Image (spheres, coloured by chain):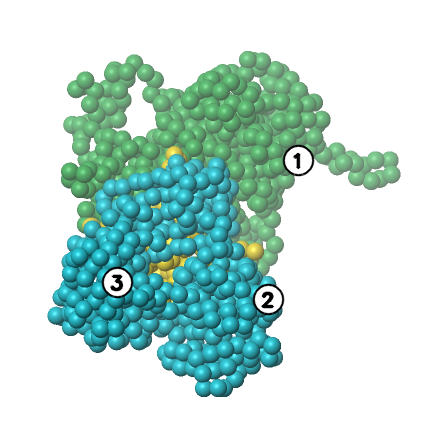
Amino acid sequence: MSKYVIIGNSAGAIGCVEGIRSIDNDGEITLIASEPHHTYSRPLISYLLYGKTDEQRMKYRSDSFYKDNKVRKMLGKTVVSIDNNAKKVVLSDGKEVSYEKLMVATGSVPFVPPMDGLDKVKKRFSFMTLDDAHKLEKAITPQSKVLIVGAGLIGLKCAEGINDKVESITVVDLADRILPSILDNEGSVVVRKHIESKGIKFYLGNSVKTFDKGKATLVSGAEIDFDILVLAVGVRPCVSLIKDIGGKVNRGIITDEKCRTSLENIYAAGDCTESYDVSSNKNKVMALLPNAYMQGETAGINMAGGNAVYDNAIPMNAIGFFGLHIITAGTYEGDSYVSTGNGNYKKLFYKSNRLKGYIMIGDVKRAGIYTSLIKKRTPLSSIDFDLIKEKPQLMAFSKKVRKEFLAK
Amino acid sequence: MAIDFLYPEYEVVRDKDKCIGCRVCERQCSNEVHSYDEDLDCMVSENANCVCCHRCVALCPTRALKIVKTNHTFKENANWKGEHISEIYRQAGTGGVLLSSMGNPKDYPIYWDKMLINASQVTNPSIDPLREPMETRVFLGSKPEKVEFNSKGEIKNNLTPQLKLDIPIMFSAMSYGSISYNAHESLARAAEELGTYYNTGEGGLHKDFYKYGSHTIVQVASGRFGVHKDYLNAGAAIEIKMGQGAKPGIGGHLPGIKVGDDISKTRMIPEGSDAISPAPHHDIYSIEDLRQLVYSLKEASDYKKPVIVKIAAVHNVAAIASGIARGGADIIAIDGYRGGTGAAPTRIRDNVGIPIELALASVDQRLREEGIRNKVSIVVGGSIRSSADIVKAIALGADAVYIGTSALLALGCHLCRSCQQGKCNWGIATQREDLVRRLNPDIGYKRLVNLLTAWNHEIKEIMGGMGINSIESLRGNRLMLRGIGLTEKELLILGIKHAGE
Amino acid sequence: MKRIYVDEKWCLGCHLCEYNCAFANSGKDNMAKALKNVKINPRIQIEEKDGISFAVSCRHCEEPLCVKGCITGALSVVDGVIQIDREKCVGCYTCVLSCPYGAIMPSDDGVVQKCELCLKNSHGKPACVEGCPNRAIIYEEKE
């Protein structure tokens, strides 16, 4: 009977459990995670504060998941090192757990840049985990003036989540636009205006020079009164377990299409990894829940002796702020096609007969048809590109392909 | 002009409480009766365009629609009825011949409904078709005079080619052109499954349907469209069309607009050209000429296929049939004046020809009297509406029947009698691609099979009741029929006694 | 497993499937009551252009990208049928981003909706199939 050890308890780890169990019903699975909670969906913490979900509903899998899948869980335990020669992991309390196949799904941690006076700020939070969300929720009051550093996905989701519960929110980002990792300038303006209309203030192309008690002074000289600080500048993949034993690591742990690390019998999935982005033909950290799950599942199948590859990952995001939906995917390079109207914004990027990426804001219906074009690298000459530019539709495919899609 | 205004014959009644504005009626009406009015925010109807085909009624998901005959009226007049007046206005306005389609709808006597069928009581016990064998298989074709033996005393096969029917019902001639590809496919597939035959009509045989050849009757009509050697040999029998019940004495006309690529190829005529079938065959002016064509076709098909001669039921039908039998035909098909058509001049359709019941009785009687009944089989068509009509036809002397209208009804036809417009909402009498698509042959063929299977059950049931266990025993068994409300003369022609006798 | 298959050859573009879908999922017992003055948002949707039309609804993929990508676990496969737990869904639209057929769509109340083969509504079997007048949508076991 095989022995599997999984480090982590989020999408990559759960995908791994389900991948293993799709092949091997009996192998012993041990799941070790620092957080004490039942598996939950981290992206939902903002929805939790927003009131769109609760702790029960934000569980990523049902209460009986571990039991149903015969998983021995060791929650609230932290793995401090891997002994890949002896094939065991060592926990912070000194205990050891041996493995035959190991999954490292350690995720990422918030990255805090050095900022002058930061240690003077008492109510300082990050926004990654359920505990972070609880701490923040306890700290805020209707009189709170919140300063969020970082206008990326985490910072803005946090802003949305607490906007109704605090007096004011100010967001500062070094970049000249919000959501710089997923939006272009024009798209960014559309979303920013929408968020601003909810009372949130932005200072962009700017950063905090110093923190004083209850006050932040920006590089531009502007001063912001605040009592609660949320740091959402960025995250760092947790790669040390692999790096420490000589596994190949770049920004993230390097994995192949079978989700193997460079070390024998060790696999990795999720935000701690780097994988191949088929839209840009580059290795990237693609910290997205769907990718994490699919990497985990792929690894799980391979760990259990099956044969799976995950070779069509691309960056992609579905996110919304105050009812305005945004879906983006791929890489923004090549020629572009833009359409706007009715408060919507859409931009397609294409190059060398392939759709490379897209941004849709507002009307996001059927976006997956675009996603699929990117993932499958469908030659645009094989479809009616003018038609599909208008809106995502299967009509743009040939009759034969439509038959494949719908009649088989 | 004001005097040409005719109040619409039908009115669309829309239950506004039920109408959900889904616009299915609008999308489904090729006559553009329904539309959505934005200002009124509701569906509205252009009654003048309605042909009463019920497509919208049948597809309306909330059953919000019905079609009623208008009660708008001319001043009542038993002689000058509304239709006479309207038709005069139409002709005075246009100078044109009035066109109609499907069969004669006038209130002439329907003899099927004036004949009753016998049943056994006490003596000659009835038969339960669910427990005992019951034969509905028939063979059509000339039957030999006598059994012959060779010098060794073995039976000589002196039988000419026969058509084997598992049920005594065939689909009558309807050309590809008058009806759609999908209608043809439905008929062909049903004929194959049922062990019977469909008939190409005068439009040739589409290349896709050669595979159903063993269940196909290929027709040779006055226009000779699509006739070539392979065609003649593709089917199980060849039918010479001399006449058609809906329009005896005149030819046919498929407007060029319906002659698209496929039909042009099948008919072997240029795309877009009118397909005109002359009134007579220009090579047939006598029974002798007909005989020549019969034998030419037999020659071309190596004497392997029975030849059918189809005529319309007209005044001297018995004498004509006798001539046809003597002319070498294996099967005579007689089409009564109720028979359908894709288009006919109204006056011809409604006033020319005679009822099939009378024609059948007199032909069968005449051939018997002349001692040549065995030389030919008789197939009758022209408004066979039910299994009871079939049983009566067989008792009057028919070997089998042709059904056309009934088959189209099974396919969805609602007898709106607007075939000539080419906009059939049920995908039958049209060549418009979007409309043809409405008849899915997977559904259509199954409905035909269902109908004929049901009728065959009923035929067995009725025969069993009479204590008869095969079509052979029923054929010409006029004692099984009694007339009701008929005159002496009618009874005499039908060769039956009156009820109570 | 029984699935819905669409044959565009027979699709008439009548849109009855959309209305039957909307009705079946309305929870009401009368179509007029359910859909009168309602702008329907069905789970099956017709695409049409130049005389071609066809219905698109969830294909219940064997390797469902929507389920694998779902951030809440609201989408799951139960006996081959991809189902949505409306209580768990937060309307992030990751499934909209993932579905290659564009068959998952926002519902009127923000969370997503998709074809569940009418197995969860009172109809019990796909209403679109039942109501299709030309068998352009069929529900059957293939292979």
Q: Are marks 3 and 2 in contact (CB under 8 Å)?
A: no
Dot 3 lies on which element?
A: strand
Nearer the observer, disc 2 or disc 1?
2
Q: Chain of mark 1?
A: B
Which label is found at residue C6?
none
Dot 1 lies on which element?
A: loop
Tell me which amino acid carries mark 2: Gly
Q: Colour of chain A?
A: cyan
Q: Chain of mark 3?
A: A
Query: Which chain is drawn using yellow?
Result: C
Q: Name the one closer to the observer, A345 or B354.
A: A345
Q: Residue placed at 35% from the left, 54% from the top?
A: A181
Nearer the observer, disc 3 or disc 1?
3
Tell me which amino acid carries mark 3: Val
Give residue B205's position: percent from left, percent from top: 57, 29
Pointer 1: what residue?
B162
Query: Which chain is drawn using green?
Result: B
Task: Say left or right for A166 vs A153.
Answer: left
Residue B29 visible to the viewer: yes
Q: Residue placed at 46% from the left, 63% from the top?
A: A252
Where does the C terminus of chain B fall, quadrant-wise?
top left
Which label is found at residue A306?
2
Give residue B148's position: percent from left, percent from top: 78, 35
- Residue most extreme to the right: B152
Which label is found at residue A149?
3
Question: How far apart are labels 2 and 1 at the CA level?
Answer: 65 Å
Q: Are marks 3 and 1 on the same chain?
A: no
Mark 3 Cα shell of 10 Å, populated few (<14), some (14-19), many (≥20): many
Tell me which amino acid carries mark 1: Gln
